[in-house]
Image (cartoon, rainbow, N blue to C red):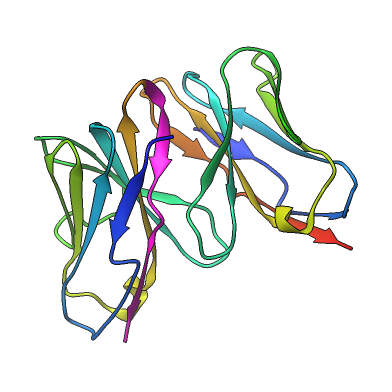
Amino acid sequence: GQNIDQPTEMTATEGAIVQINCTYQTSGFNGLFWYQQHAGEAPTFLSYNVLDGLEEKGRFSSFLSRSKGYSYLLLKELQMKDSASYLCAVMDSNYQLIWGAGTKLIIKP
Amino acid sequence: GAVVSQHPSWVICKSGTSVKIECRSLDFQATTMFWYRQFPKQSLMLMATSNEGSKATYEQGVEKDKFLINHASLTLSTLTVTSAHPEDSSFYICSARGGTDYNEQFFGPGTRLTVL
């Protein structure tokens, strides 16, 4: 079966760095997405990785290792507004997104 | 990025009534639209996938006669919750795929449905 695993909840301090891991097992691979979702709102796109390596975009970076079925989202210089759920999703061979359950990130002052 | 709108953003209805939710891609043609449901503190659950001009493909456990999906044009898909009951209360989100980047899905803002 297809499976996406990510931690349920993480806590970090304002100004610090946090890494949210995601491991996956899917039928085929056409890329991995990270989305941010604030409570009561729809997800917003953060990053897309289809090749191995690190993609940096401002304070957020995303890493992918296809051989290990592993990705992480790195958030630097954390701000209170970064408190949200972070969803990992993999696009399978049918171009369908398989979603993780999301990681709730709590930022403390 | 591409913009997807949903209407209404929230709706309250009585049990037994039907509710229609619209999803529109505003600046691109969406060859495929997806309908998700999200209960509080849970992840997105894909309900169905619809391609323009063809019948929707429903996920296992989703009643196609209860959740009617119509994707009549490349910019509009509708989800009708028929004979809604309190257990149908949820956050319904659509997403659309198309435009220049085939792999990316663009999400609408969601519709919060409360059935009394």
Q: Which residue sits at x=82%, y=48%?
A: A78
Q: Residue A3 appears in which quarter of the rendering? A: top right
State which region is magenta.
B101-116
Q: Is residue B55 left or right of residue B37?
A: left
Q: Is residue A73 above or below residue B81?
A: above
Q: Is residue A54 above or below residue A89?
A: above
Q: Name the image quarter holding the C terminus of chain B.
A: bottom left
Q: Is residue A21 left or right of residue B114?
A: right
Q: Is residue A35 left or right of residue A12?
A: left
**Is there any visible trace of residue B61 in the rendered image?**
no
| Residue B113 on the magenta segment | yes
Image coordinates for residue B51, horizontal then vertical, percent? 19, 34
**Is there any visible trace of residue B15 in the rendered image?**
yes
Q: Which residue sits at x=70%, y=18%?
A: A68
Numbered disc total: 0
Image coordinates for residue B98, horizontal then vertical, percent? 30, 28
Q: Is residue B7 left or right of residue A35?
A: left
| Residue B10 on the magenta segment | no
Q: Residue B68 appears in which quarter of the rendering? A: bottom left
- Is the stretch drawn in magenta largely helix, strand or loop? strand
Q: Which residue sits at x=56%, y=17%?
A: A50
Q: Residue A57 appears in which quarter of the rendering? A: top right
Q: Which residue sits at x=33%, y=71%?
A: B88
Q: Is residue B61 above or below residue A5?
A: below
